[in-house]
Amino acid sequence: MDNKLTLKLDQKVIEQAKSYARQRNTSLSRLIESYLQHLTTGVPPGDDDITPLVKSLSGIVKESNWQAAEKSYKDYLKKK
């Protein structure tokens, strides 16, 4: 069961952490949960979360291609 946790952190640290999480296609909450789990159990984060198939597919679609596809889809929705 997920519970809410409130933290007070330096704004610059928050911005850097959000950017780090975004680059890894995860949420800040998931990133912090994974880190805390690693600290308390010693199990490296992410070992169980991603299957070998998903790991092999990571990076196939370039970000610029994805952004172009997203823009095309948004344009289509606007016209529709």
Image (cartoon, grey):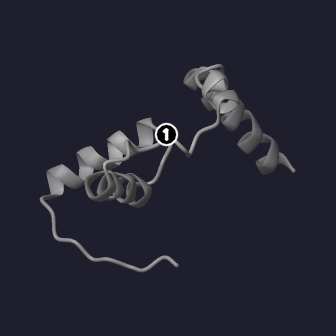
Residue 39 drawn above or below residue 66: below
**Quick one: 71 or 60, which is closer to the camera?**
60
Residue in the picture at 24% in, 44% down: 16
Residue occupying image coordinates x 70% and y 28%: 53
Q: Is residue 7 above or below residue 30?
A: below
> Few, some or many C-alpha atoms within 10 Å of disc 1 (few <14, some 14-19, many ≥20)?
few
Question: In the figure, 61 relative to 45: above or below?
Answer: above
Left or right placement of residue 66 versus residue 1 in this view: right
Q: Total marks drawn? A: 1
**Residue sitting nearer the eye, 68 or 45:** 45
User: Residue 17 location, x and y as percent?
Assistant: 28, 48
Q: Amino acid at mark 1?
A: Asp
Q: Residue at 39% of width from left, 79% of height from top?
A: 4
Q: Which residue corresponds to the image point at 37% horizontal and 42% vertical from the top-left? A: 44
Q: Percent from the top left, x then y, of residue 70?
A: 68, 37
Residue 47, position as x, y percentages in the image? 49, 39
Residue 10 position by quadrant = bottom left
Residue 46, percent across and down? 47, 42
Q: Nearer the viewer, residue 24 or 66?
A: 24
Residue that sits furthest to the left in the current view: 10
Quadrant of residue 9 within the rendered picture: bottom left
Q: Which residue is mark 1?
A: 47
Q: Secondary structure at mark 1?
A: loop
